[in-house]
Amino acid sequence: MLKITAILKTLFVVFTVSIAISCDTKTGLENDFVKNKILIPEILKDLKDIEAFVTKTELQINHLTVQSQQLIEEYRSLSDKSDKNNGLMTDVKKVTLKGRINGVFADLSEIYSKIDSQFSEFENLLNTEQKSACKSVSNQLKNRIDEVMISFNPVEEASKKGKIIIF
């Protein structure tokens, strides 16, 4: 009976922490990734499909960038604590955060793929100058995603060295 009570208490705490983390709504985080606008060359400004896709994609990337930065900062702050102070709850929080970070990166990878496929379709309808401009915009969007992914590398490297516990 005591084991069941202990298990239920542990599950309750894990559930409560998961809800608390998922309800975290930090806002107003401005960073360099979001401040930089994607530049659409003049030659493409008249093509509303391209402009709409770029605007929509940029907004998605910006949203996911802010979300990932918040999660990474929270993960780093948990990882910076002394190992002696880390208990089961801290490890559960880390695992939860790592899962959420990976979810954001999966969404960014999906956007990266959509950029390739959508711009391939656009290029079939464009002249040589427009194709070059289109490639430039595509590269800007992809570079933005790459920068976000690279910003997570120090956390990944620390976890591989055993400094951060990842399950």
Image: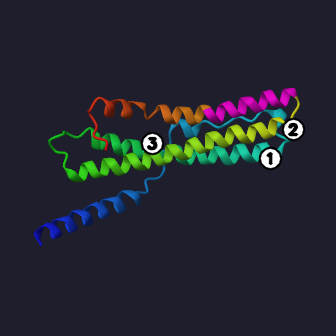
The residue tagged 3 is 69
Considering depth in this image, is 71 or 97 the residue closer to the camera?
A: 97
SS at mark 1 in the image:
helix
Between the residue at mark 1 and the residue at mark 2, the CA separation in whole angstroms equals: 11 Å
Q: Residues within 10 Å of mark 2 (few under 14, many from 20)?
A: few
N-terminal of the pair, mark 1 or mark 2, is 1
The amino acid type of the residue labelled 2 equals Leu
* Magenta highlight on residue 166: no
User: Going by the image, does 26 lie left or right of 35?
Assistant: left
Spot occupied by residue 29 in the image (x, y as percentages of width and height): 47, 46
Spot occupied by residue 58 in the image (x, y as percentages of width and height): 64, 43
- Tell me the mark number nearer the camera, choosing from 3 and 2: 2
Please give the label number shown on residue 49.
1
The amino acid type of the residue labelled 3 equals Gln
Q: Are marks 1 and 2 in contact (CB under 8 Å)?
A: no
Range covered by the magenta-colored residues: 128-142
Q: Residue at x 37, y 49 (%)?
A: 97
Find residue 141 and report its image quarter: top right
The residue tagged 2 is 125
Between the residue at mark 3 and the residue at mark 1, the CA separation in whole angstroms equals: 30 Å
Q: Is residue 73 above or below residue 10?
A: above
